Image (tube, helix red, strand yellow):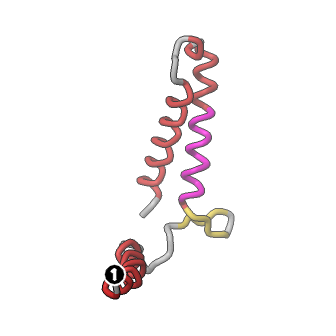
Amino acid sequence: MRVKSWLQAISAPLLATLLLSGCAPSSAPSLSLFGAYFPVWILCGVLGVVAAITTRLLLVVSGLAETLPAQLLLCVAVGVIAACLTWLWLGQ
């Protein structure tokens, strides 16, 4: 019993140490906009949402909205791809 409680007491800090070991000591990638520094992940999220909305509008205008069965999945996938490509482009 005593060994089990000792393992439980040490497992949480050890797990946290292992999970946080990949974090860099430097700050997150940032972009200077209008004299202030903004995290790049905010820009990635905004561009992903804009890409998803643009995809939805293009589907409606082209008439494909009536024929495609998984429009939400398609719009989300395009948004995630746009956000990931933006991160690869801007995130050092």
User: Residue shown at 41%/84% (left/top)?
Assistant: 9
Give the side of residue 57 with respect to residue 85, left or right: right
The one nearer the camera, 37 or 34, is: 37
Q: Quadrant of residue 36?
A: bottom right
Q: Amino acid at mark 1?
A: Lys
User: Residue shown at 59%/57% (left/top)?
Assistant: 42
In x, y percent, where is residue 19? 38, 72
In x, y percent, where is residue 31? 56, 64
User: Residue shown at 51%/23% (left/top)?
Assistant: 70
The residue range painted magenta reads 41-53
In x, y percent, where is residue 40? 54, 60
User: Is 91 within the magenta?
Assistant: no
Q: Is residue 37 above or below residue 51?
A: below
The one nearer the camera, 51 or 70, is: 70
Q: Is residue 58 above or below residue 19?
A: above
The one nearer the camera, 16 or 2, is: 2
Magenta segment, principal secondary structure?
A: helix
In x, y percent, where is residue 72? 56, 29
Residue on which disc 1 sits: 4
- Secondary structure beneath disc 1? helix
Quadrant assignment for the C terminus: bottom left
Quadrant assignment for the N terminus: bottom left
User: Residue shown at 63%/34% (left/top)?
Assistant: 53
